[in-house]
Image (tube, grey):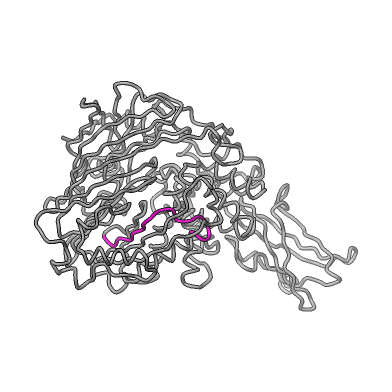
Amino acid sequence: MRYVHHAVSAILCLWIGGCVTGPTPQAAGPGLTTDSDWFRRSEPLDRGTIFSALNLPQPTPARSASGVPGPAYWQQRADYVIRASLDDRENAVSGSQRVMYTNNSPDPLWFIWIHLEQNYFQDDSLGSLMREDAGRFGNRASFRGGFEGVSVRAGGVDLPMAVYDTIARIDLPAPIPPGGGRFEFEMEWSFRIPEYGADRLGIDPTSNGLIYQLAQWFPCLAVYDDVHGWNTHGYLGQGEFYTDFGDYEVSITVPRSHLVAATGVLQNPAEVLTAEQVERLDRARSSEQTVVIRSAEEVTDPSSRPPGDGPLTWRFIARDVRTFAWSSSPAFVWDAASIPTRGRSPADQDPTRAPPPGTLVQSVYPVEALPLWSQSTQMLRFAIEGYGRRWFTYPYPTAINVNGRAGGMEYPMIIFCRERRHDRGLYGVTTHEIGHNWFPMIVSTDEKRHAWMDEGFNSFINYYSNAEYWNEPPAGRGSSADFARVMTEPDQQPMDTPADRVRDGRLGSLQYAKPAVMLVLLREVVLGEDRFDAAFRRYISSWAFRSPRPWDFIRCMENAAGADLAWFWRGWIYGTGTLDHAVTGAEFVESSRRARVTFENRGELVMPMTYRVTYHDGSVEDRLLPVEAWFTRTRFSATWDSDGKTPVEVVVDPGEKLPDVDRANNVWRASTARGK
C-alpha cells in the first residue's frame, strides 16, 4: 500500500511552513530571509544601507546576545533501535524500528512529524514532478520506489498516520509532556532500492558483485525546535536534511558473502568476520600505517567469509549522531589504520565533554578502484587530523570511506565517494565529505533553509585542507579571484536562499563557493588569522552537538572577534552585489607636500583594500584603505606625507585577494594619465 494523499493544499501549507502549530518564529528584520520572502529577495542590495545595523531576531533565554546557547537552550532527542534486512535478489530493504522520542521543549506535543524520504522515489512525488529532467538530484527513469507496508504502533495499539509526499503526521493518544517527557513507538516498513538515488544512495555493479549504499533510508523524526516548531520541509532532492541527535543500535542482516560498513562501532566482529580478519582489524586499531583487512586477491576467495550457510547479522552502535548510513557488498576490499587518542584541540575546551577517543579509519572499495583507493585511508587520516588540529577534535571512534555509485555524500562516521581516476580528485572529495562531519554532523545546521552554513563552512575548511595536503597555496573554492566572474552572472540570489529554491546550476556557486570566499576574506583580509580563528573555534565549540541559526553565527563571531561586521554580513549573506574598487587619479600636492590618491567604490559591496604605490624614485609602498573609509561616501581621497615623492603608479589589491569584478580600473599610471 502506498501512503500518499493528494492533498495539494495541505502539502503546500506544510512545505511553506505556515500551517503547523508550534513556537512563533523569531521575527526577521531587513536583510534576514524568512519563509515569506524566499521568492522575492533577489534584488541587489541598496548600497546606502550597507553600514546600517542588522535587525537580528531578539536574543532569547535559549539563544543569547553573545551568539552562544543560552541557559534555557533545549533540543529534542530521538534514539533508535533498528533491525533491517537486505534482499539482494529483489534489491530491497525491509525493517522495523523502535524509537524513543524525548520532548525537551517547553511545549506539550499532541502529534509528531516523520520524514519518509524514500517516498521521493515514487514517480508522482513532488520532487519527481518538479524537475524538467532528472539531473544530479532527480529520480532517474521514473523509478517506482517509496516506502511500502508502513505501520506505526505504540503500546500495542495502531496509531493513525497521514502521509503527505515525504512527510507524515502521527497523532498521539495523549500529549508528550514538556521538559523531558518521552514517547516510545514502533514502525515497520520496506522499500526497493533505486539504482541511482539522487546522488545520496544507490546500487553500483562491479565485477565481483553489487555495492549497495543506503542513506536517508528509514522513517526519521522531524526536528521540533525553538525557531520554527516542527520543521516539515519535505525532501525534494537538492536540499539535504536536518535531524536531531540520538543513539542508534542497528542490526543489519545481509548475505553471508557481504561485508558491511556503517555509522558506528561494529559490536560482533567474531560473528561476521573470519578469525584472521578479526586479528587484522585489532592490529589496525593500534597502527598508523594501513593494514589490509581483506585484500583484492581475497575478495573472490570463499574462505574470506565465515563458513556456514545463510545470512549474517551485523550489529552497530553509534552515540550522539544525527542519522545512520551503511553500505554492503560482496565486492569490498577493506583496509584500515588508526588515529591514536589525542589531546583536545584549541577549540575543544569544554571540561564536561569526554576526551576524544582514538579513531579507526577505514576504506572499503571494489578491485576496480585500485590502485588509487589504496591511498584512501591515509588521505582520510590526514584530513581528520588537520581539521582536529585547526578547528575541533574529531569526536567519533570510527570514520569510513566507501567507494560506490554515490558521487559524494556525507553521514556521521561514514562517507560515500565515487572518484576512481585521480589522486587529486580522490583527496578533494574525501576531505570534503569527511569535513561535513564538522558541518553539519557536529555543528548541526538546518540544511533545508541554510545550506551555506553546511556546504559553505565545509568548503572553507576544505580550502586549507587541500593546500596542506598538496603543500601548495590554497586554490579552488575559497579563491576570491576565481569567484569574481560568478558574481556578475544575471539573476543572482542571496546566499541565505534555501537549497531547493536555488536556481538550476547555481547550487555550487551560491551555497559552496560564495560562503567559502566570504570566510576566507573575513579571515585573511578583514579580521586577520589569529582573530578569526579564535572566534570561529568559539563558534564551533559553543554549538557542537547543537543547532545554530545564521544570527547565532553572526553574533558569536562578532562577540568573539570584537568587531561590528554588519556591513560584511549584509553584503555577503543577504545581498547580491559586486565589488568594484577603482583608482581614478594620483598626484603630489605641492602646497601640502603630501601625496593624494583618489578611489571610487563602484559596486554594492564594500571591503577594506590594500593598494601599492610606486614613486618616481622607484621606491614602493603598500598602504591600507580601511572599510570605514566608505562609511559615508563612494569616492575617497587618501592623503599622506610621502616625504616629497610623487606617485607614478597605483595598483589596487596587488595580491588579488578581493573578488573585484573589473580589474581594468585597478591600475593608475602617470604616463597613462598624461596621455589622455
Asked if one can make out residue 526 in the rendered structure from this viewpoint, the answer is: no
Residue 231: give x, y in percent of width and height.
39, 35
Count of numbered labels shown in the rendering: 0
User: Which image quarter: residue 303?
Assistant: bottom left
Q: Is residue 386 left or right of residue 218?
A: right
Q: Position of residue 635 (x, y in %)?
A: 72, 54
Viewer-nearest residue: 204 or 84:
84
User: Is residue 645 within the magenta segment?
Assistant: no
Magenta stretch contains residue 397: yes
- Numbered range of the magenta stretch: 388-404
For this view, does 667 lie left or right of residue 510?
right
Q: Residue at x 44, y 60 (%)?
A: 341
Residue furthest out toward the top: 174
Locate the C terminus by quadrant: bottom right
Q: State the residue lying farthest toward the left.
A: 309
Judge whether 178 appears above or below 559 on screen: above
Quarter of the image for residue 601 reads bottom right
* Depth order, front residue of 651/200: 200
Q: As drawn, is 206 to the left or to the right of 19?
A: left
Relative horizontal placement of residue 446, taking residue 65 as reference (left or right): left
Q: Position of residue 506 (x, y in %)?
A: 42, 53
As drawn, the residue found furthest toward the right would be: 591
Residue 599's spot in the image, x, y percent?
71, 59
Q: Quadrant of the N terminus?
A: top left
| Residue 416 can be seen in this image | yes
Q: In percent of the image, x 32 and y 34: which residue is there? A: 100
